Image (spheres, helix red, strand yellow):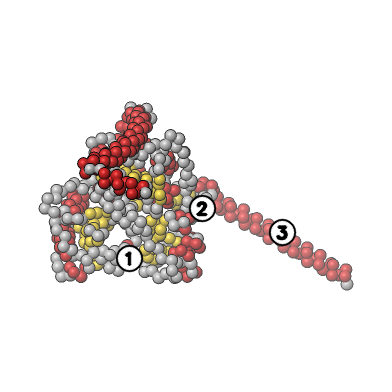
Amino acid sequence: MNMFNSILLVRQLSPAQLAAVILLSILIAVLVAGNVLLFLYLRNRGVRKLCTHKLQNKRDELLQQLNLLREGVLVTSDEEEEEEEPEEAEELLLVDEEEDDDNDEEETAVSNEGPRSLGVVSQEEVDETFDAEILYISNTSMPVREKLGFADSEYDSKRYYVRYSLGFEAKLRLSSDEVKERYVALMNEIAMYDGVKVKQSYRQQRIYKGRKTLGLIVFRGKTLCIALALNPAEYAETKFRGIDKSDSKRFAKTPMFMKLTSQRRLDYVKYLLLQLAEENTIMPLSEPEQLTFELAEKSREELFIDNKLQISVLGEVPDSVPYEQPDTEEDEVDEEELESGISVEELKRYNRSYTARIIQADDELKARYSEIKNHIISYRGVFNGITWKREAFYVPKRDCFATFAIRGKTLCLFLSVPSSKFEGTKYKVEDRTQQVRNAKMPTMFRIRSDRGTKYAKELIDIVLSEKGVKINEEYKPINYRPSYRSTENLINGGYIKVKTTQVIVEEPQTKTSKRSKTSTNNRTSKKSASALKKTATAESEAAVSAADGDSVSESKSE
């Protein structure tokens, strides 16, 4: 009945009246929707204002602390500037243990299936440039041996060259107390923002809110670093400038790269976190929770069993290498030995990285290195990565075609093509196919002169022409010759590792001391001889008396 009445009412309205009713209905709906949108806008605006106000207060507090730091109230800023300037100037030569930035979760493969049969590393590869450590199977715990595949007794006397790959947690636990303090302070700063979480993987920690990545926490060698989702160009001319990592696939979303090398750098990162929160409208918590972490140092075996560290077995140690059993306890030297002319001296061995060798090389080697590297980088799409002992060059899709290494004082170029390709030519290359380390880079060319530099560039042209890589005609050469730095400076920077061993040395003695020592020995020998005679006499008398006693007892019994 109601429907029938409404139909009659519509029929009674004229077309003009019906159009007016429809327009009025649409207008009312638009007004209602507008009021709803206005309410939401005003509420979001209020939230944004509140967030901006809190962030501004936090920013003012941080800027005040930075001003105090600049004035030298807490630390001397001039000294820190002097320490950090060389670090930024030599960014292209930094030792990076994470050779592949693009493969985020790549881990070193370790086989743990059954008995292992590995080749013996040649003697030529056993030198100070070999990037490995010796693992003594007899001193390794059974869980580690089982995981590596060396559980059988036949491996008890074997030694292997191994390379350790540390994950994020392993590096953090093995870092210094200062690095751990900065990490805890950074995590507490991140915990101040509402909804921001941190997720840890093998190689890094990811800072995110919802599905958006806000930053990455990583290690570069022994240095704690953070990459933020900020535009580095906006801070290039400020004191908050960082390293632009926008060309790296791994840091494409977080190109603002900062190294936490000091407390002042940590304060800079706190300021940048404020800018990041403001860009993403992240509210700071009124009462943030104070976080604590258990970061006690663990042994390599414990980290390996917990999958925080990976071990790559490179090959068996040849018998020609001296068997130096590592001591589990410190040797104690007798005081009498010290008084008799025996002293303990510390023998230091320096393990220089590839970067350290370039820095301390002569000017001729640096000039050849810079010229050849510029020639390689001038090709389109070619990029490099530096590890402890080598510098590798790649074309797109992570295809490594050449590496640099330093043998003694000679710069060597390794190529991915077989050495047979250059037989009968003017290029005097060496075949390294039989060596475990150079299996993927079988051809080596030593660069000792300007002619060698020219030939090295020609070899690069031959390899890249086969790969179809074109040269960039607009490339401008860069000076890759770093300034010289002392050994102590490089040790402090982590570019040289020092291994100290204690050696017992017998000091040379004068004639008088030898005579006195000889007379003392003679007196001692005479005293010992007389003592032996007395002892022998006493023993014989005791034996005779015992025999007499036995005979008397026998006669009595009879």
What amino acid type should be assigned to the residue bearing mark 1?
Answer: Val
* Residue wearing tag 3: 538
Query: What residue would you read off at disc 2?
Result: 329
Q: Residue at x 44, y 70 (%)?
A: 115
| Rendering coords of residue 3 (x, y %) | 34, 49
Mark 3 Cα within 10 Å, few/some/many (few <14, many 20+)? few
Q: Nearer the viewer, mark 1 or mark 3?
A: 1
Earlier along the polypeptide chain: callout 3 or callout 2? 2
**How many marks can you see?**
3
Q: Residue at x 28, y 45 (%)?
A: 10
Whether the residues at callouts 2 and 1 have beta carbons within 8 Å, the answer is no
Mark 3 and mark 2 in contact? Answer it, CB < 8 Å. no
Residue that mark 1 sits on: 436
Residue lying farthest left? 473
x, y percentage for residue 101? 30, 53
Q: Is residue 455 left or right of residue 75?
A: left
Q: Position of residue 390 (x, y in %)?
A: 28, 56
Amino acid carrying mark 3 in the image: Ala
Q: Name which residue type carries label 2.
A: Glu
Estimate the spatial distance between the alpha carbons at disc 3 and disc 2, rounded to whole Å: 44 Å
Relative placement, left or right, of 202 versus 240 is right
Q: Position of residue 349 (x, y in %)?
A: 37, 51
**Which residue appears at 43% of the width and 66% of the height?**
112
> Is 338 or 198 nearer to us in this picture?
198
Is residue 34 shown above or below 500?
A: above
> Of helix, strand and loop, which one carries label 3?
helix
The disc, 1 or 3, on the residue closer to the chain's N-terminal end is 1
As drawn, 540 above or below 263? below
